[in-house]
Amino acid sequence: MHADVPLLEVQNLCISFRSHGRNVPIVENVSFSVNMQEILAIVGESGSGKSVTATAIMGLIDTRDVKITGSAKFRGQELIGLPQKAFRQLRGRHIAMVFQDPMTAFTPVYTIGWQIDEQIRAHERVSKSEARARTVQMLGNMGVPDPERTANRYPHQLSGGLRQRAMIAMALSCNPALLIADEPTTALDVTVQAQILDLIRNLRHDYGSSVLLITHDMGVVAETCDQVMVMYSGRVAEFGPGDAIFAQPAHPYTAALLDSIPPLTGPRPTRLPSIAGSPPSPSERPAGCAFAPRCNYSHKSCETVPPLVTYGQQSVACVLPVEGRALPSRAVTKDLA
Amino acid sequence: MISALLKRLGQTLFVLFGISVLVFLVFFATPGADPTSRIAGKNASPETMTRVRHEYGFDRPLPVQYATMMKKLFITRDLASYVDRGELVVPEIVRAAPVTLSLATGAAVIWVVASVAMGTVAAAFRHTWIDRSLMMLGLIGISIPVFWLGQVANLITQARYHDTWLFSWVPGLGYIPFLESPVGWFRALIIPWVVLAVLFIGIYGRVLRADLITVSGEDFMRTARAKGLSPTRVLLVHGLRTSMITFVSLFGLDFAQLIGGGALLTEVVFGLQGVGRLTYQALSNLDLPLIMASVMYSAVFVVMANAVVDVVYVLLDPRVRDAR
Ligand SMILES: Nc1ncnc2c1ncn2[C@@H]1O[C@H](COP(=O)(O)OP(=O)(O)OP(=O)(O)O)[C@@H](O)[C@H]1O
Ligand SMILES: [Mg+2]
């Protein structure tokens, strides 16, 4: 495998659900790629289609009312339209997924260890005791204290942080090339959140895995990611290297998200600036730029959907750079703080 | 462990006491239930009435009467029916219990196996014609009155086609004790079992399908699929196993109810002298001793079945295990 071929390459992914006899587009023309050992963040407010994108790549959307077009190639293999049988070989083995809520993501009636063993034995011909040995080792690597005993405990007996570690241990148990983590820290408290992010950040060195990290928290992105894709209302707003985006966001939405990061140190402001209004529901998206109604810069040319243009190192779906009115660059708060 | 058992025993005694007092009071509050005139017979002379009243203790205060009845039922076991003079109640229950137990247990085996199969297959093929026809069958099963189904079964196997090879093995109506002839026992009961099970197969199959479909939207089912497990494994090992928790609690209630005499109609149609029939007989005769005995019997079974369900629950759900 060449390092310059992306591990996952998504092009023009469109996902729509049929409801009440109407096709409602949820994700429109999303393209991005994840390189080997790279962490890509998908950021966006609730409802922007992050989870739907991830579950589509995993082939986990199981309603018949869904229509998926476009392409998602994993190591050159097309995933869109792949039969479930072939998907099963990939899932858990080459692409693994960690979900948002560790409280409900484990089957309540089996022990953690049993569930991790199950995944290992689903993909590799190993004996029960070999699988368990690996399970215990994985749990230990993920920083679970006393892994032998923890493996024999039921999900409800563990704290949220431990469960999420166990979840990540399970996801990594077959050494997948790509880990999709859908808001892995949202349900956890702040200290645990930092530990889990640390764990994810180190995966590429320790396991050589790439990570697709879904989050709505720019703070999380700042701490972990190489590449960032900002989604708004099912479309890509901005895509590019994290540093570049943090230094000079080109989309007003990205800038607004950055403004809402609480400072890592120093006094917390009493109120963080938040973006006024809320994103449009998928069935009521405006004809032009979906962010226009909430944007301070909106004007006449925002009434058509802005194409994705290259600006510096990133690509952005906004007319401002084209019109020569790019947003000012900003001090990188992360380093100054 | 011991304390849990003692607690359970205490609860049982309390329940039995409550129910027996209730039955007792309701009986004496029922107009026209005065047992004296029934025992003494129609147009009995006032002297006879007084004698009977005294002999049976009906002239004594209610608490004393209650205590005497309980003593006769549980300790000396010589409680006699008011209707057939001298007929002892406890042996009557003891004779009827194995019939009902055999009937309910056999039917339960059939309905559990069939409804699990039906619910699982329907959920696996949800929204296809397989699912729809299974659910339609279930609905039919629920709507068919059990006595009608029993009569039709009898008509076919006992009369119309009894002489053909198909049903010539079916013995006449009635119960054959297991110890007398296991094969005869089985032959005599297989048709009642199926008839009794039909309703429950319909209900349980539908409930299980709905549960499985609800559960399939749970996060852990998505995790199981994301692990790369086969759909069968996801459905059976993760979905069905979790859904069994509701299934078992439902089953405990229904089974106890049947053991306690709830299979009356089936017993009547197939000429089985079980507890249901006995209770019915006692109620229509307003025969307090028999009513009391059969109610106590079924209460014991309901409490016991609940205890068994609790144990199974603990085995099935680790969360319950830790909650106590
Ligand atoms: N199975 C489905 N059928 C119809 N609509 C769906 C389905 N799944 C998701 N949607 C819709 O897709 C939109 C995007 O959902 P998605 O879960 O991807 O958002 P998200 O970006 O992950 O948000 P969050 O931060 O809340 O997780 C939502 O408006 C949701 O209602
Ligand atoms: Mg989501």
Image (spheres, rainbow, N blue to C red):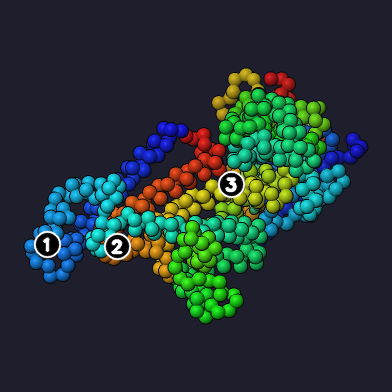
SS class of the residue under badge 2? helix
Q: Is residue B83 above or below residue A267?
A: below
Under circle 1, the secondary element is helix
Rendering coords of residue A73 (x, y %): 83, 47
Q: Would you name the residue on which mark 3 appears?
A: B242
What residue lies at 63% left-to-right and 43% top-to-bottom?
Answer: B220
Q: Amino acid at mark 3?
A: Thr
Give the residue number, with chain letter if any, for mark 1: B49
What residue does disc 2 label? B283
Chain-order first, disc 1 or disc 2 = 1
Residue B227 at x, y percent in the picture: 72, 43
Local packing at callout 1 (Cα closer than 10 Å; few below 14, some 14-19, many 20+) is some
Q: Chain of mark 2?
A: B
- Disc 1 + disc 3, Cβ < 8 Å: no
Which of the two discs, 2 and 3, labels the residue nearer the N terminus? 3
Q: What is the chain identity of the residue bearing mark 1? A: B
Q: Is residue B174 left or right of residue B135?
A: left
Quadrant of res B138 = bottom right
